Image (cartoon, rainbow, N blue to C red):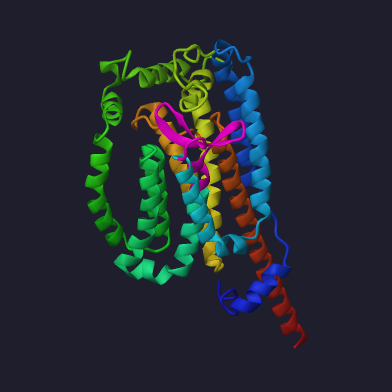
Amino acid sequence: MLLFNYNEESQATRRSEAKGRYDLSLILAALALASLGAVMVASSSIAIADGQHVGPFYYLERHLVFLTLGLAACVVMARVELSWLERNALPLLLGGIVLLLLVFVPLIGIRVNGARRWIRLGFVGFQSVEAVKLILVIYMASYLVRHRENVQASFFGVIKPLVIAGGLVGLLLAQPDFGSATLLLGVTVGMIWLGGARVRNLAMLGALALPVFGWLALSQDYRVKRLTSFLDPWADPFKDGFQLTQALIAIGRGEWTGVGLGASVQKLFYLPEAHTDFILAVIAEELGLAGIVLVLGLFAWLVGRGFVLGLRAVEQGQRFAGYCAFGVSLMIALQALVSIGVNLGVLPTKGLTLPLISSGGSSVMMTCAMIGLLVRISYEVSRADNAMLQLIAERQLADVRA
């Protein structure tokens, strides 16, 4: 630590000359989740695709295409210099705002089930918020580096980044997308706290914001129905509580080791969104508690490695890299936590997929891009460690010669 605070300019020069390596365990955890996801998308979507007369493997083929595109996005992000991302954080944020506004433009925005969340890119739709998730992490990391002292010491230093996030949240609520809005706000608060903000200041803001979010949650009938069905899904198991009751039945049937891969009954037109929002219920039914533990373990390892990399980067003085690692880890962790909680009936139903596992297009691609950013950070951390070791070796050699 002292060696890296010795001379910041020579430290940066020495680090740029040193070689690094990518975190293999991080890559393997992501690959394991993606591989499990491909298998479960195939298992959970065959009946749905066959019923839609698009071919039994339609959703699997689509998922693999977006996984391939996501792999390309991962490789690109792993090659991008973090300094470039830090310099262009504001233009990226403005681009994210444009993406959220495009969903309201006729002929560009796509309305699905009354919500405007997608933009038309040729023959496919792209969900703007998926790109905004990564953009927000990059911008907040840049902001925390530039205004670290204000964030740590001032109440208004905490308000400013929350106002920026609030603007994005407002655009999401207009779509409407309450789940993603809550996720972005939660990640922003988490990054600010990890950036050194006082808990007292965050608690004061939370006390002010809680009534607002309570009003938003109760302002729409469909949100109220989700809350009431979550509290007692068996009160109306064939209407408002249908999704959750079917998910709980699937989980109960799985018991310890599951009914066997491909043998799920609930995915046969009983469980809605079996290959997307409720894919964990299919995993629980076919692979049992063992499958759920495997999923939780892989996410714990992936997110844990992300936080470790972030801590090491901050200790090395690479604060932008560290805050980016914190943000990506929080984003993946919170989205996975919400998705798993919804499937298990401990959280109200939200339209959030399980990262790297659920069938999806833009969500799969952008999650892979986030993994690519983590991989890049692991390379920078390793390179800094090697630079420190080289410096120690050179000093020891100089002492011997002296």
Image position, residue 244 (x, y; %) = 37, 22
Above-or-below relation of 208 to 3: above
Quarter of the image holding residue 228? top left
Question: Which quadrant of the structure image shows residue 12?
Answer: bottom right
Is residue 351 visible to us here?
A: no
Is any part of residue 375 visible from this angle? yes
The magenta region covers 105-133
Q: Residue 267: x and y, percent? A: 50, 15
Direction front: furthest residue: 106
Q: Residue, x 55% and y 44% (percent of image)?
A: 302
Q: Vertical placement of 99 versus 345: above or below?
A: below
Q: Residue at 64% of width from left, 18% of height from top?
A: 57
Q: Closer to the camera, 375 or 361?
A: 361
Query: Viewed as shown, does residue 20 lie left or right of 105?
Result: right
Q: In terms of depth relative to the viewer, which is nearer, 139 or 95?
A: 95
* x, y percent for residue 1: 55, 71
Q: Could you tell me which residue is drawn at 65 percent across and 25 percent down?
A: 61
Is residue 87 or residue 27 the one in the foreground?
87
The tally of labels here is 0
- Does 18 lie within the magenta span? no
